[in-house]
Image (cartoon, rainbow, N blue to C red):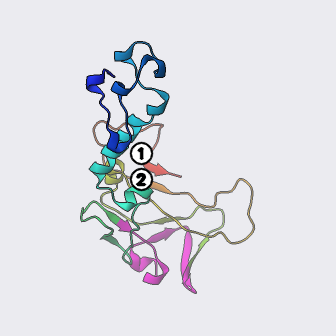
C-alpha cells in the first residue's frame, strides 16, 4: 500500500513517498490503495531493473544486451565460448579450416569446393542439395536454447519465389516430456 508508514521518503535518492504526498497530488482519493502519482510511475520498473541487474552481476554485456562473441575452433564439435558448460557447442564450416569433408560436413546432390578462401556450392540440375553435419546432442538446443548463424552470398541472378537458403535442424531423438511439436511430419527443432 501507500500508507505513509509503508512508503517512507528516501531523500538521498530523490524519492519522496506517501508521507510527503497529500490527497491533492495523488490520482486516487483512497490513499491506502493508491498505486502512484504521476511523479512516481517509474519506481516499480526501476526497482525491478535494479533487482535484475544485481542478480545478473551488472556485466556490461548484459546491460548492453549483447551476447559474448563465440570464437569457433576450426572444424568438428568443440566446446567453445565464454562458458565452461559442456552443453555449449560450436559446429562450424570455416574456409580457414580447410576442406568441408575434413571438418565433418557432407554434401548430397551437389558439390562443395574451397576456392580463393571461400566455399562454393553447386547443385545438381533439378535436385535440392543438402549440406549436413552429424551431432549427438541436437535435443539440447530445444531444451537449453542456442544460436544458429549462417553467412552466405548468392551468385548469379536473383529469381522470384526461389529459395536462397533453408536451415533445418532435425533430430530422431525422442522429444522430452512436456514438449509438444506443432504441425505434422518430422520433428524439426528449427527450420528457416
Q: Give the range drawn in magenta.
A: 90-118
Tell me which numbered mark, 2 or 1, is placed earlier along the sequence: 2
- Decide which of 121, 2 is in the foreground and name it: 2
Residue 106, x across and y down, in percent: 45, 71
Q: Within the magenta stretch, is there residue 99? A: yes
Residue drawn 62% across the image and 69% down it: 124
Which quadrant: the N terminus? top left
Residue 52, x across and y down, in percent: 32, 46
Mark 1 closeness class: few <14, some 14–19, many ≥20 residues within 10 Å: some
Outermost residue, bottom side: 116
Q: What element carries label 1?
A: loop
Is 3 rendered above or below residue 117?
A: above
Residue 99, x across and y down, in percent: 46, 82
Residue drawn 29% across the image and 30% down it: 8
Q: Distance from label 2 to label 1 (Cα)?
A: 7 Å
> Is residue 27 something that shows in the picture?
no
Q: Mark on residue 187? A: 1
Badge 2 is on which residue? Answer: 170
Picture quadrant where residue 120 is located: bottom right
Tell me whether circle 2 and circle 1 mark residues in contact (CB < 8 Å). Answer: yes
- Decide which of 86, 60 is in the foreground and name it: 60
Is 42 rendered above or below residue 150?
A: above
Q: Within the magenta stretch, is there residue 24? A: no
User: In the visual, does 5 lie left or right of 116?
Assistant: left
Amino acid at each position: 500500500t501507500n500508507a505513509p508508514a509503508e512508503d517512507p521518503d528516501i531523500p538521498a535518492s530523490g524519492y519522496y513517498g506517501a508521507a510527503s504526498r497529500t490527497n491533492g497530488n495523488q490520482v486516487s482519493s483512497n490513499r491506502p490503495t493508491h498505486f502512484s502519482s504521476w511523479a512516481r510511475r517509474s519506481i516499480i520498473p526501476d526497482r525491478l531493473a535494479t533487482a535484475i541487474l544485481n542478480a545478473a552481476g551488472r556485466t556490461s554485456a548484459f546491460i548492453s544486451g549483447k551476447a559474448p562473441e563465440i570464437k569457433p575452433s576450426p572444424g568438428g564439435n568443440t566446446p567453445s565460448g565464454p562458458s565452461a558448460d559442456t552443453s555449449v557447442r560450436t559446429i562450424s564450416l570455416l574456409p580457414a579450416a580447410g576442406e568441408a569433408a575434413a571438418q565433418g560436413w557432407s554434401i548430397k546432390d551437389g558439390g562443395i569446393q574451397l576456392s580463393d578462401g571461400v566455399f562454393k556450392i553447386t547443385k545438381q540440375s533439378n535436385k535440392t542439395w543438402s549440406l549436413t553435419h552429424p551431432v549427438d546432442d541436437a535435443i539440447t538446443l530445444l531444451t537449453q536454447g542456442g544460436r544458429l548463424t549462417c553467412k552466405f552470398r548468392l551468385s548469379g541472378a536473383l529469381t522470384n519465389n526461389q529459395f536462397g537458403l533453408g536451415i533445418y535442424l532435425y533430430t530422431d531423438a525422442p522429444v522430452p516430456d512436456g514438449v509438444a511439436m506443432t504441425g505434422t511430419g518430422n520433428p524439426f527443432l528449427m527450420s528457416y
